[in-house]
Image (cartoon, coloured by chain):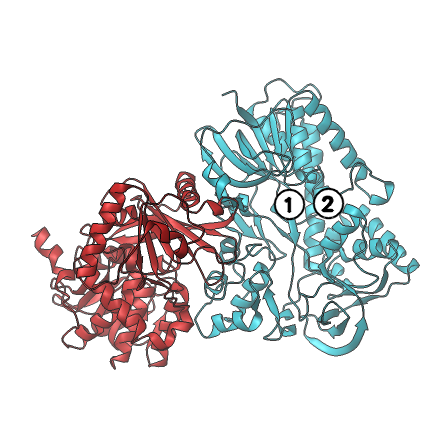
Amino acid sequence: MTDRFDLAVVGAGPAGLAAAVTAAEQGLRVGLVDAAARPGGQYWRHPAESVSQRDGHGTRTFRDLRRRLRALRDRGVLTYLPDRQVWFVERDEDGHVLRFTGTTTAAGGVLRSRALVLCPGGYDRQLPVPGWDLPGVMAAGGVQALLKGNRTLAGRRAVIAGTGPFLLPVATALADAGVEVVAVCEANHVTGWARNPLGAMAVPTKAVEALGYAAALLRHRVPYRMRTAVTAIHGTEEVEAVTLSAVDAEGRVITDRGRVEVDLVALGWGFTPSLELVTAVGADTRKDVDGSLVACVDEWQRASAPGVYVAGEATGVGGAELAVAEGELAGLTAASDLGGRRPARRVRELPVRGLRVGGLRVGRLRAAIRRRRAFATAMHLAHPVPAAWPDWLTPETTVCRCEEVTAGEVCRARDDLGAVDVRTVKLLARPGMGWCQGRICGYATAVLAAAGSGDQPSADDLRSLAHRSICAPVSLAELADSHPDSPPPDHQP
Amino acid sequence: MRRTADVVVVGAGAVGAACAYFAARAGLDVQVVERGRVLGGTSSACEGNVLVSDKEVGPELDLARYSNRVWREDLGEFGGLWEFEAKGGLVVAATDSGARGLAELAGGQRAAGVVAEDVAEDDIASFEPNIRQGLRAAVHYPQDAQLQPMLMTAHLLRLTRQRGGAVATGTPVTGYLRDGDRVTGVRTPRGDVSAAHVVNAAGPWLSEVAALAGVDVPVLPRRGFVLVTEPRPKTVHHKVYAAEYVAGTQSSDTGLQTSPVVEGTPSGTILIGSSRERVGFDRTVALPVLRELAAKAVDLFPVLAGVQVLRAYLGFRPYCPDHLPVIGPDPRAPGLWHAGGHEGAGIGLSAGTGKLLAQALAGHHTDIELAPFDPARFATETT
């Protein structure tokens, strides 16, 4: 079939870019669909064309991938479809069919392919806390996106709270941008690293990077407070102050550390991978060490569904470098599985466990993936979401912002109406039923639902959250016009 | 879980909850057993219809009218808990032949006591300002209503517990306690429960639960999809559907049928149905079905074209080949009762079904005849 791509790649972040570029260089005809207007994903989010040295490490990798993307596009072997959101995926006899919505500048349409690489990335994992719905409270990733995206300051006096190493670059970026950062509050204790020193040591560059952030924080005189959490946010029209609390290892409040006046609160509780497309193609999923649902992949990035590969955060949150390595491996595996159209000239072909492309390159990649995965696991184990965070809530605390559902309503559905799991809580109290379809409140709701029986959310609970019959909003007119014989997208973007 | 009860109800969906509630209200000791979690099946995958408009004259219309009263009278005090909304239905016809069929249907319903008001062509817009131009006829059914089926089911189970009943989830029925032909209780992995009566309210799985007692009750799944839009300011005021919908519900075709059904909800979303197809318990999201639903909804309400669909869900209507529910004792297995097979009307008919069944369980005369719904009709077919 002439209108069928060899490979469709969803997502043009670190993993997707690497997968698409690699596979196209191996001779596959590749279609790359992405929701954003420019390549780079959440991680490499840059204003227009300017990429300065200040954007941190990995920029060289990004520039290289972007250059190769342009070259492949110019050669006509890679079709890049930005500004398109995939809302439906299904199998057909020859592979997969992706349907995507358009925007004002791009038409919606269909992309058929023999195989599929899913690199959907992730988004901030959010936990409700009293006052978190006030203007001026943002997810840490959102703050960084604002800074990277258009350099606007989200506030003048900020507190950064949550857990994990990601708090550091956000604090540094805010301080560099001239925001007074009154504190970085880390809910855990960094001696947590000692629990798994091998994992942490596996990626020495990460240690260097952390030192760099620590130095920057020192320079800006930003206090770094461990076992400290923002347990309430105050304000009427917008954020005015936060309550800081000293917490124990489980997150239970030990002492009140008082109110601090701020106009910006950045909360970072890690990331949640986007699993809509992974579950839609019927691929197996599992619960990762950080409590997120992730795709099961083999050591070649193959998912359990035939012809599907997954790379990046969707296989387990681990950062951009891991994502790039996984994306590259997925691209190589797909090329090998599909039997690239022409022999790859750039790499020696070696039969490595059935993989016929670039044995050395593959070996290096897989070693890098193992190392970075070990590091990510150590990071997750050292920075768990504190189990007792629901104690910080009051019955009036909003859990679902779209549908304005409070913690009290969630608990009533659970305790009075017998909703013991997140699905039933959603049906009865409507959290997660609005615009974001639970992307913001899903994790918190699942935890609150499971807490009724003293449990943590099960993998099945997380699956029911991730599953969406329609993967992204689509207008009725577009849905009505989604004919099976829709033409393929233009090959020249 | 109880070891003994007067009544074991199998299934914690809307019909099971209504049977349990009315049985408890009649003073019976009730144990509900549910293999999954509450709201695991069809009751959480429907629109919450309480309709008289879509029933042709006959026993099902009688049950619908009766149930409509039960919702407003016996259960009226709880209506707010489950967002009972007496918003009325508007059935429209786009063609002259459709208009004739609708007039005939409404005439018969009126004679049977249904309030069915003809709406002049020029007045249709005053009922639904956003509806398309060029419709030939419409009938307004003020008795039609809608409720939130998940809240209704959960609250009826809560009220059952309040009256001393018990609800056990994660408890599948694996067999029956028998005394000769007689069913004297249920077996579950969590232990046996002996009871004078066992009510099979397993929805589209009613056949499976009946088969465990060696009796055949032909209830089959008939799949339907619903689209849910983003929340909107009030756009659709009634339950609005095309006259062809009634023909669709009464057909026995196995192939795909769709007819537009559009309505708003108190949360602002718009629900769009309806489709029916006999594909077993296939949970694959079928894009061609969603496409037809979207196209027909936009045809009826052009203003919806740019409205975003946030999700779609599917459910399985419990369908009987003769389009009548199965309500009453099964003579082939004394002690076993069935309450199900309401197809797409189970939410609306659940209250009436529960009340009638409770009357029969208590040995009282039922408010309306259960004979047309007698499970024995299948016994005579097979012998």
> Residue A43, labelled with which disc?
2
Displayed quadrant of residue B11: bottom left
In the rendered view of the protein, which quadrant contains the N terminus of chain B? Answer: bottom left
At which x and y percent is residue B221?
29, 50
> Which tint was used for chain B?
red
Give the amino acid at mark 2.
Answer: Tyr
Q: What residue type is labelled 1?
A: Gly
- Vertical position of residue B90 compared to residue A104: above or below: below
Q: What is the secondary structure assignment of the residue under circle 1?
A: loop
Residue at x 89% of width, y 55% of height: A216
When the figure is inspected, residue A350 is found, relative to residue B310, above or below; the finding is above
Instruction: Name the residue tied to disc 1.
Output: A121
- Measure the C-alpha gap from mark 1 to mark 2: 9 Å
Q: Chain A is drawn in which colour?
A: cyan
Q: Where is residue A82 in the image (x, y as percent from the top left)?
A: 65, 35
Compare residues B328 and A457 and report the one nearer the observer.
Answer: B328
Q: Disc 2 on helix, strand or loop?
A: loop
B176, above or below A481, in the image: below
Name the side, left or right, on which B305 lies relative to A209: left
Mark 1 crowd level (few <14, some 14–19, many ≥20, 10 Å Cα): many
Q: Can residue B137 be seen in this view?
A: yes
